[in-house]
Image: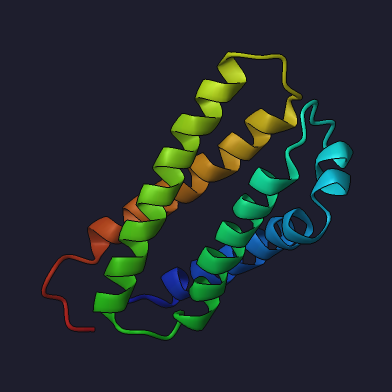
């Protein structure tokens, strides 16, 4: 069964993704300079912004869906969060980056475990 708490987490995820995604898409240099990022690639930053908006937007649009839809979205969120964590940690370990990078990793780790918890709750065959 899809709980009210999971639906609420999807809305929280939408807000977080849009708070970061919109500035990365519209003003990547400003956003990354604000965070003290040393090397700025607007192309890659806008691509990340678009991904955040897409995944976060679907979190809002799909928040009232059935269990099958939530399982699929949770699978996507787990893949996105885990690979993003691997990529970010690899990058942070190989250079001199601002501490906010680790904060962003921390946000992804929190979301990963939230999604994992709920994905384990939504076993296959649960119709609700």
- Above or below, 75 against 58 in this view is above
Q: How many marks?
A: 0
Determine which quarter of the picture holds residue 52: bottom right
Counting from the top left corner in percent of width and height, residue 4 is at 44, 77
Q: Is residue 1 visible?
A: no
Counting from the top left corner in percent of width and height, residue 11 is at 57, 72
Q: Is residue 95 visible?
A: yes
Please state if 83 lies on the left or on the right of 94 as rendered. Answer: left
Farthest left residue? Answer: 125
Determine which quarter of the picture holds residue 72: bottom left
Residue at the spot 68% in from the left edge and 47% down from the top edge: 43
Please state if 4 lies on the left or on the right of 39 as rendered. Answer: left
Farthest front residue? Answer: 43
Front residue (pair 64, 47)? 47
- Above or below, 115 against 64 in this view is above
Residue at the spot 50% in from the left edge and 72% down from the top edge: 59
Please state if 18 lies on the left or on the right of 82 as rendered. Answer: right
Front residue (pair 5, 84)? 84
Counting from the top left corner in percent of width and height, residue 66 is at 30, 84
Which image quadrant: the C terminus? Answer: bottom left
Residue at the spot 13% in from the left edge and 68% down from the top edge: 124
Which image quadrant: the N terminus? Answer: bottom left
Color style of the picture: rainbow
- Above or below, 49 against 55 in this view is above
Counting from the top left corner in percent of width and height, residue 55 is at 51, 65
């Amino acid at each position: 069964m899809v709980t009210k708490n999971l639906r609420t987490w999807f809305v929280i995820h939408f807000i977080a993704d849009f708070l970061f995604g919109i500035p990365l898409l519209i003003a990547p240099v400003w956003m990354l300079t604000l965070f003290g990022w040393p090397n700025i690639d607007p192309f890659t930053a806008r691509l990340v912004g678009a991904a955040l908006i897409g995944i976060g937007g679907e979190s809002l649009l799909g928040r009232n869906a059935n269990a099958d839809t939530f399982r699929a979205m949770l699978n996507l969120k787990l893949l996105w969060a885990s690979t993003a964590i691997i990529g970010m940690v690899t990058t942070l370990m190989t250079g001199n980056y601002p501490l906010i990078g680790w904060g962003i990793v921390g946000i992804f780790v929190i979301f990963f475990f939230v999604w994992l918890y709920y994905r384990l709750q939504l076993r296959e065959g649960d119709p609700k």
